[in-house]
Image (cartoon, helix red, strand yellow):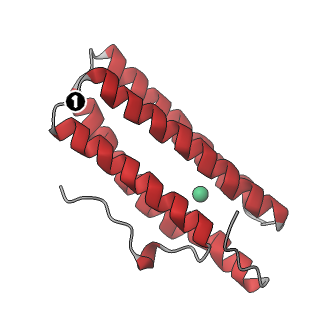
Amino acid sequence: MNSFKWNDKSSVGIEAMDNDHKELFDIINSLYVGINQGFQYAKLDEILLELLRYSRYHFEAEESLMRKYNYPELQKHIDSHVKYVEKIGEIRKRFTDTDNDLVVLMKMQEFLREWWINHIESTDKKYGEYLASIGVKYKVH
Ligand SMILES: [Fe+2]
């Protein structure tokens, strides 16, 4: 599997959000590296927790930005974030319950790549377009 790279086509047009997405891709890549290099369970779980922590931080930033500018599809977008956090929690639990089965983590890796590419493409870009349409250009949070 190739490393998971952010490129300009993934831009939502808001620099701070793009930077968060790049950071998230890096964490997902470090999970991939960790699986392949046979990291200890504790180290892999640390990466998972970091992924959860950073995802939550990023979702809050996105949601407050959308809220600030009365984005009409805010609730739908929040629902998508909530589902993601639940799913990561479930997979993390399954990983522990299956005695740290790496196949569970590999599947999670695939899920993460697909989820993020799809979420940015079909959900995040919409608020980017909305903000652009009302003249908001954000350089920082
Ligand atoms: Fe989002």
**Is 33 above or below relative to 21?**
above
Instruction: Please state the horizontal and vertical placement of residue 138, each as a whole percent of the image.
Output: 70, 74
Task: Specify few, some or many for label 1: CA neighbours under 10 Å numbering under 14, 14-19, or 20 or more.
Answer: few
Residue 119 in view here = no
- Nearer-the-camera pick, 95 or 6: 6
Amino acid type, callout 1: Phe
Q: Quadrant of the C terminus?
A: bottom right
Residue at the spot 45% in from the left edge and 28% down from the top edge? 90
Residue at the spot 54% in from the left edge and 45% down from the top edge? 55
Residue at the spot 28% in from the left edge and 40% down from the top edge? 107
Residue 96 in view here = yes
Instruction: Please state the horizontal and vertical placement of residue 39, each as a whole percent of the image.
Output: 22, 30
Q: Quadrant of the N terminus?
A: bottom left
Residue where numbered disc 1 is placed: 39
Q: Quadrant of residue 35?
A: top left
Q: Quadrant of residue 114?
A: bottom left
Instruction: Please state the horizontal and vertical placement of residue 49, each as a whole percent of the image.
Output: 46, 32
